[in-house]
Image (spheres, rainbow, N blue to C red):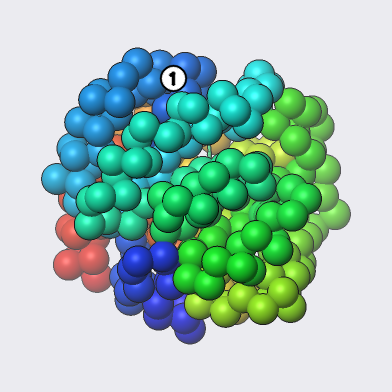
Amino acid sequence: MTAQTIWQAGRFQIGLDEPKIMGIINLTPDSFSDGGTYSRSTAAALAHAERLLQEGADILDIGGESTRPGAAYVPPEEEWARLQPVVRELAKWKVPVSVDTRRTEVMRCLLGEGLADIINDVAALEDEGAVDLLASHADIGICLMHMQGLPENMQNNPRYEDVVGEVAGYLKNRAEVCTAAGMDSRRLVLDPGFGFGKTLQHNIQLMRHLPELQAQTGLPLLIGVSRKRMIGELSGEADAGARVYGSVAAALAAAARGAAVLRVHDVKATVDAWRVWRALQ
Ligand code: HH2
């Protein structure tokens, strides 16, 4: 359980008394598990959004840049061009819209037009000007994620002395930077960043120690393990699109350890599993 029970997220206050499901929509031609599926047209992306909501998603997370290991550089203008038509439509829907971006330029475009409730940043607002920009938009929710290195090099031999302590220390520090800039801590959730500069052993350690991470940072945790390489390594399933069972098991492991938000591709599978698991506790 998290001490903080509300996530202030733009137009919404999201209750965190039980795990919330964030459904993923990748508007990228090259995402590792669904690349190209929803980037072909705005209609395809919106149809997918509709489906995720019917399946029980509480939040939609839209991304215009792949951050998988070794992903190719995408200019911010290209990222914005991918996002724009879809977020313009979603902003009219009654659902919290999270945008997965690490560029201040893209955030400025989104926030200037009121097109996002949440900024989900795998670089924890490290891009120049990002903290000041978010500080000047009072209600926007923020996910600060830990990553060692950058997507282009992060899986080249990641190293830690104490992965849990270092990730907790980094996230705590980034949260303090945000609150020092005047942001209310109810806007913040933290994410250890599974697979972002981590070996399988690092990922396992982080998952086993989520309660300590939570206790050390004092903020709710968002967990994204869906279809990732660690699921493939643990289950033996090489095809990312077929990792639903392993992903659900990992999502439940995170929920059982107090995760506040689960970022997933397979919404129905995760929601059903959570409902059954919760009822049987
Ligand atoms: N993982 C990915 C992207 N964004 N954001 C948060 N907060 N946490 C995560 O674990 C996370 C994230 C990578 O997954 P995906 O979006 O499916 O793939 P890609 O980066 O290839 O688009």
Quadrant in the picture for the N terminus: bottom left
In the rendered image, residue 81, in percent from the top left (x then y), is placed at: 49, 27
Residue at the extreme front:
113
Task: Indicate yes or no: mark 1 CB to ligand 1 under 8 Å.
Answer: yes
Q: Secondary structure at mark 1?
A: loop
In the rendered image, residue 245, in percent from the top left (x then y), is placed at: 32, 36
Q: Nearer the viewer, residue 241 or 112?
A: 112
Does residue 102 appear left or right of residue 236 in this picture? Answer: right
Report whether residue 201 is seen.
Answer: no
Residue at the extreme left:
54
- Please name the residue that numbered disc 1 is placed on: 35
What residue do we see at 54% from left, 61% from top? Answer: 142
In the rendered image, residue 261, in percent from the top left (x then y), is placed at: 41, 60
Vertical placement of residue 62 versus 164, above or below:
above
Quadrant in the picture for the C terminus: bottom left
Vertical placement of residue 10 versus 215, above or below:
above
Count residues near mark 1 (Cα–Cα under 10 Å), then give few for <14, some for 14-19, many for 20+. Answer: some
Q: Nearer the viewer, residue 126 or 77?
A: 77
The kind of residue tagged 1 is Gly
